[in-house]
Image: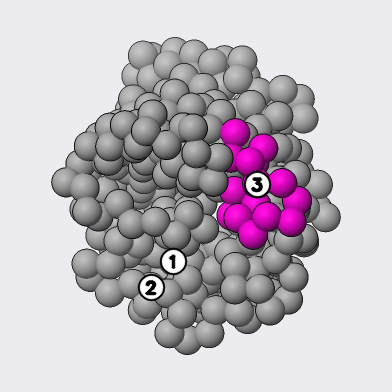
């Protein structure tokens, strides 16, 4: 879920504060001052929750998200059914649960996000100004649930919801690029599972449109570069057109430049570039590509926490790269590391998880 969505539903501006920390301190003071005023308590709770969310984006402290969740539950109690602010509170709470699920992988958080997202959407019927963001947020959580449980109806519903959101975000709408990116991800996932080339071609086409809407300097240019690159890599794997792979590598390098150390998307870019270089090594046998892939995937593993959702798949990617190097250099240390990495990956997976049988 992007920052724009939470700012939209909250309808507050934090730019007047020099630091998010300062914004949080101010809101804590306000909370104490207005605690006795029922009509103002919900607003103050909500603003403090958003400040904590923003501080999480800055520093990555998951405890900030958990505190925001507790505050937003208080807001919901103060905004019962029929209150005009209930839908925005539900959306914000769903965003926080999604963030915590992505960080800690607790399925109950994901289920809560979907439940809250459905309730928020029901409160935003056709014609409601926030129906688009409610459609988009619920679709993102359904896509995450598909990635966890592989239930096709979740992915199909996500795609339909994203298409509906895109219709509400015409050319010039500031949320259009976000909807395009989200739809690209879902179409790419469906292609991976069903192999329909039409999904792949639409993902590449929409990915190019999304990138055009994010010129240099745009805060979401990095993710748009990454998404298009992933689509081009998939198309190379289907059609073996080298120019697709070369463009994918160049786009991933450009995305990585926009994601320095500490950036939340850096691990994703490191891994994606490593995968592309490993594929180019398979086709051209340039050892430098393989060595760079090993370096990048090792850096990816070092940059994600032990409970991160993608850790098992990164371990597997690292093992594949080292296996290729073992076949090229016959170094026993690489083979031993391959075995250790796959064993660690298996410990993180259950038989129902995608990738379990691969590892």
For this rendering, which residue is in front, 119 or 151?
119
> For mark 2, what is the residue?
211
For this rendering, which residue is in front, 239 or 129?
129
Q: Residues within 10 Å of mark 3 (few under 14, many from 20)?
A: some
Q: Residue, x 51% and y 22% (percent of image)? A: 307
Q: Is residue 146 magenta?
A: no
Nearer the camera: disc 3 or disc 2 = 3
User: How far from the left and from the top, in percent, is residue 207?
Assistant: 47, 72
Circles 2 and 1, Cβ within 8 Å, touching? The answer is yes
Q: Residue, x 51% and y 51% (percent of image)? A: 1
User: How far from the left and from the top, in percent, is residue 157?
Assistant: 77, 61
Nearer the camera: disc 3 or disc 1 = 3
Q: Is any part of residue 309 visible from this angle?
A: no
Give the vertical position of 288 relative to 161 (above or below). Answer: above
3D distance between C-alphas at marks 3 and 2: 39 Å
The outermost residue toward the front is 36
Circles 3 and 1, Cβ within 8 Å, touching? The answer is no
> For mark 1, what is the residue?
228
> Which quadrant of the structure image shows residue 50?
top left
Q: What stretch is highlighted in magenta?
A: 74-89
Q: Residue, x 22% and y 53% (percent of image)? A: 16
């Amino acid at each position: 879920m992007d920052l724009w969505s939470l700012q939209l539903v909250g309808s507050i501006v934090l730019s007047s504060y020099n630091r998010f920390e300062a914004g949080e301190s101010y809101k804590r003071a306000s909370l104490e001052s207005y605690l006795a005023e029922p009509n103002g308590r919900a607003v103050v709770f909500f603003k403090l929750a958003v400040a904590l969310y923003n501080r999480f984006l800055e520093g990555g402290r998951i405890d900030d998200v958990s505190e925001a969740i507790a505050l937003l539950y208080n807001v919901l109690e103060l905004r019962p059914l029929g209150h005009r602010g209930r839908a925005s509170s539900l959306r914000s709470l769903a965003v926080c649960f999604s963030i915590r699920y992505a960080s800690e992988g607790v399925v109950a958080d994901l289920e809560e996000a979907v439940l809250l997202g459905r309730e928020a959407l029901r409160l935003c019927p056709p014609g409601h100004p926030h129906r688009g963001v409610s459609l988009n947020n619920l679709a993102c959580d359904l896509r995450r649930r598909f990635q966890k449980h592989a239930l096709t109806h979740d992915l199909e519903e996500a795609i339909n919801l994203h298409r509906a959101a895109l219709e509400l975000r015409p050319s010039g709408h500031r949320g259009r690029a976000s909807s395009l990116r989200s739809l690209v991800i879902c179409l790419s996932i469906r292609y991976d599972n069903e192999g329909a080339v039409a999904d792949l071609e639409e993902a590449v086409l929409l990915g190019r449109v999304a990138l055009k809407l994010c010129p240099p300097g745009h805060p979401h240019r990095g993710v748009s570069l990454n998404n298009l690159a992933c689509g081009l890599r998939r198309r190379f794997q289907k059609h073996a057109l080298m120019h697709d792979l070369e463009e994918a590598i160049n786009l991933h390098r450009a995305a990585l430049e926009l994601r320095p150390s500490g950036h939340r998307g850096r691990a994703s870019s490191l891994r994606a570039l490593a995968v592309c270089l490993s594929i180019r090594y398979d086709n051209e046998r340039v050892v430098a590509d393989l060595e760079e892939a090993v370096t990048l995937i090792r850096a990816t593993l070092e940059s994600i926490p032990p409970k991160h959702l993608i850790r098992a798949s990164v371990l597997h990617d690292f093992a594949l790269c080292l296996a290729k190097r073992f076949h090229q250099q016959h170094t026993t240390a690489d083979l031993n590391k391959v075995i250790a990495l796959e064993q660690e990956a298996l410990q993180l997976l259950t038989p129902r998880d995608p990738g379990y049988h691969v590892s």
